[in-house]
Image (spheres, rainbow, N blue to C red):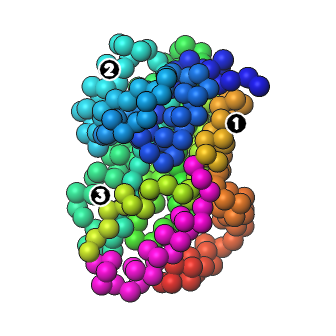
Amino acid sequence: MKKLGDIYRTALITGGTSGLGLAFSEMLAGEGVKVVSVSRNPDLLPKMEGLTGVSLDLANMASVSDFVEGYLLESGVPDILVNNAGYGTFSGWSQFPEEEIVRQIDVLLAAPIRLCRAFAPKMADRGSGGIVNISSIAGMFSLPYMPLYNAAKAGLSAFSASLSLEYKDIPFVTDFRLGDFRTNFNEAVKKESVLENDYRQGAAWSQIVKQLDESPDPIVAARALRRVLCRRQGGIIYSGGFFQARVAPLLFRLTPSGFLRAVLRYWYKL
């Protein structure tokens, strides 16, 4: 079976030190691709041939610009860009931290957009390359009390669709819409203290935790990404458990929005 290293030489991945990003990084490096993983804590990366960690705070747009300039000078244009980094804040809207509004938009949306702006035109000029933007079905089925996460993921999907119109084949642009995977995402979610004192929020959070505990291992998403890259497959791709990856997208297209909202309120005990 042909390895990805026979097709691609280099990959740049954001948020590659844990969860999905780590699964993607290890899969690519294991297939012979030289991977640069950017994150705030690159020392957490395992020692692995072909895998290099670089420190970068994606919430700092000046640092993102400096990184891009340095990367282009040292490594040139990556063959693959995977915009994966992300986190959530769980809070009632009236208590939602002001600073998290800007920070989540920067990390989840502005940083991927800036990286695409830096590399997509150069991939097109070179005549090869691919961009995979890791979005979420949360852009269609909103998670309660996580409004900025939902909005940013929906925005990233819309941005990917626009980019796909401009760059039909080179670079191919993939909107990789993921469901829940068994990662440390929930542990990293910033939760306000009101969680302990609000029954509705507590019930909703319990359901979110249950979903994650019952979800597939990140290796499932890594295998799906491998198929995308082997086929140079742009457009919308879903991955996750059977219901989230197969049934939910169909329900979203066929079911009236008011009914979907009622189902979500019931599901999360709202």
The reply to whether the magenta stretch includes residue 24 is no
| Amino acid, disc 1 | Arg
Q: Is residue 121 visible?
A: no
Q: CA distance from mark 1 to mark 3?
A: 35 Å
Is disc 1 placed on a helix, strand or loop?
A: helix
Q: Position of residue 48 (x, y in %)?
A: 48, 28
Of badges 1 and 2, the one in the foreground is 1
Q: Nearer the viewer, residue 266 or 195?
A: 195
Binning the other alpha carbons within 10 Å of mark 2 as few (below 14), some (14 to 19) or many (20 upward) gives: few
Q: Nearer the viewer, residue 28 or 44?
A: 44
The residue labelled by disc 1 is 227
The reply to whether the magenta stretch includes residue 199 is yes
State which region is magenta: 194-218
Q: Position of residue 112 (x, y in %)?
A: 42, 39
Q: Position of residue 219 (x, y in %)?
A: 61, 45
In the picture as drawn, the residue positioned furthest to the front comes out as 47
Q: Which residue is pictured at 30% across the width and 84% down the height?
A: 197
